[in-house]
Image: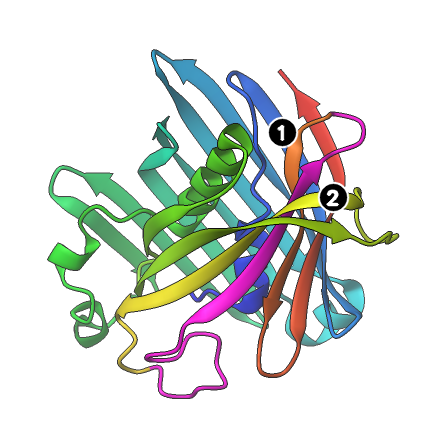
Amino acid sequence: MKLTPLAAGLLCLLPAAGRGATLELDFAAYGGGVSLARGSVVLTEEAEGTASRYRAELEAEAVPWLGLFTNFRYRAEAAGRLEAGAAQPDRFRGERRLRRKLDVMALSYGPDGVEVTADPPISPDKAARVPPDSRRGSIDPLSAGAAVILTASRAGGCGGRYPVYDGRRRYDIVMTPQGKGELPSSRYRIATGTAEVCAVTIRPVAGFQGDRDPDRFFAEGVERKATVWFARAPESGRVVPVTVEVPTDAMSVLVHTVGVKAGS
């Protein structure tokens, strides 16, 4: 399952839910000022001793005008355990439809490492680009997003390294606090004013040998950057990512939170 600039932005919109709570975020994505996609993210978390169990669900699809050309839809879910801000996933499944092609990626986690099931199957040569030792201790991209946002919400900032394996590539997501910044008024997002700013670096580790086109989001030896602004949602009072910006060589992709529903 490929991580595009849009997908990278969506991962950063995973909600900051409290224990025993469910939080749903509706989002809208834009590229170069043009509407690209809409969708929602739901995170459910239940206490388990000093830790918690989580389930994350993400759905996104192209807006109607773009859907006529791409038929793009993406659906993913992950579940596992959260402790001290670290995710320990049990499973992940992602389905991406683009035009007439459907790609499915499933990851399961056990004491022997990460088991990958892909449809269409990954060739042995490509699978060997990320050896088992590199996969051990990694987490899926959806669980990484949950851990990043939950940690930022509870600790009042961001920071740390998250080792991600998406079934094809191993990369690190590095979070660095940037202090406070001002979000100008905008009809595209739910909050404005003072926000916590976090810089995101996506750092290649393994599996990038075939990614030699520097214009692609994933390219061998190329680090990608993103910025996340956190603020309190007006009605629920929850700290959530209100805007994610993912710059590319062609344009900047902006993902704005446009609605928040909190429950327990």
> Over which residues does the magenta segment extend?
211-236
Nearer to us in this view, 102 or 10:
10
Q: Name the residue under label 1.
A: 23
Magenta segment includes 104: no
Marking on residue 194: 2
Q: How far apart are marks 1 and 2 (CA)?
A: 22 Å
Q: Can residue 3 be seen in this view?
A: yes
Report crowding for label 1: few under 14, some 14 to 19, many 20 or more residues within 10 A (C-alpha): many
* Quadrant (top left, top right, bottom left, bottom right) of the N terminus: bottom left
**Mark 1 and 2 residues: CB-CB less than 8 Å, in contact?**
no
- Residue at coordinates 63% horizontally, 62% vertically from top-left? 245
Q: In this view, does 174 lie to the left or right of 57?
A: left
Q: How many marks?
A: 2
Nearer to us in this view, 2 or 15:
15
Q: Position of residue 199 (x, y in %)?
A: 52, 57
For marks 1 and 2 on the same chain, the one whose residue lies earlier in the sequence: 1
Specify the quadrant of the image occupied by residue 33.
bottom right
Label 1's element? strand
Specify the amino acid type for callout 1: Leu
